[in-house]
Image: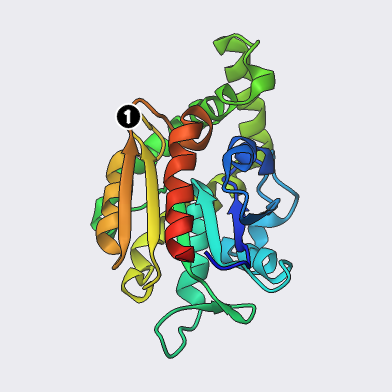
Amino acid sequence: MPDDPIRVLLVHGLCSNAAIWDAFVALADPRCELWVAELPWRGTGIAGWTSQPVEEWIGQAVARMPGGPDVVVAHSFGTNAVLSWLDRQDTGPSGRIAVGGRELRGVVLVSPLYRAEPEDFDWDSIGYYLHNFDQILAAGMRVRPGSRRLSPEQRLAIAVKVRDLIGPYGWIRFLDTYLRMPEVRTERLLMPFLVVGGESDSIAFPADSEALGKALPDASVHILPGSEHFPMVASAESFADLANTFLRTLSA
């Protein structure tokens, strides 16, 4: 492996924050240089974040990382933002994307929300994410250490309050970004991808991970048994093994 570290940018999902990567940070290959973005859709959201497309926020995060990343690692809604951002980038002579003066060498997408065709979305799937949004938020709370003392009823009550603070505009931005996934020109994305999903994920279904893996020219897909929407937390060691192996392969 070269002496230079491989520079990794970690991107969290909707209503989450940088702390969601703590377990991976503790287990990551020490030869990696880890940077964590705090996006404006963290927590209950920063006022006004829905006023611009999510890919523009990813562009700002990348621009603030001196020299740019070698690898981007994203979770859930963050995968949608990263894919939309990648789709906007120009490709160099090698067909790869250059960021901050360096070529992006790989991407890790965890629990991605992806559909390959517009016809893959129907009213039932849209209704699912609308009527279960509070349950989705409550699922995210279960993996946070501070919330484990709460009962399911308490977590749901807090999730409803978070849902109301996010508001319809935040939910619409989430849905709009998800609905635009069939527009992403995945055939242009020639760098290696690692796609990791959870077998029991009821938010980003394993079928989404499988569909994304088929749409990308160079992707390996791993569905972790028994894991739900946060495999980097619930299956931390398994996820870290996959991610570290992938990162070492890129450095070889």
Asked if one can make out residue 111 in the rendered structure from this viewpoint, the answer is no
Q: Residues within 10 Å of mark 1 (few under 14, many from 20)?
A: few
Coloring scheme used: rainbow
Q: What is the quadrant of residue 45 in the picture? A: top right
Q: Residue at x 61, y 55 (%)?
A: 31
Q: Residue furthest bottom?
A: 93
> Helix or strand or loop: what does disc 1 sit on?
loop
The answer to whether 117 is drawn above or below residue 111 in the figure is: below
Asked if one can make out residue 13 in the rendered structure from this viewpoint, the answer is yes
Q: Residue at x 50, y 33 (%)?
A: 236
Left or right: residue 232 compared with residue 155: left
Q: Give coordinates of residue 158: x percent, y percent.
A: 65, 22
Q: Give coordinates of residue 146: x percent, y percent.
A: 69, 20
Q: Residue at x 65, y 71 (%)?
A: 68
Q: Quadrant of the C terminus?
A: bottom left
Check disc 1 and report the residue beneath it: 225
Q: Identify which residue, 67 or 91, lies in the foreground.
A: 67
Amino acid type of the residue tagged 1 in the rendering:
Pro
The answer to whether 203 is drawn above or below residue 114 in the figure is: above
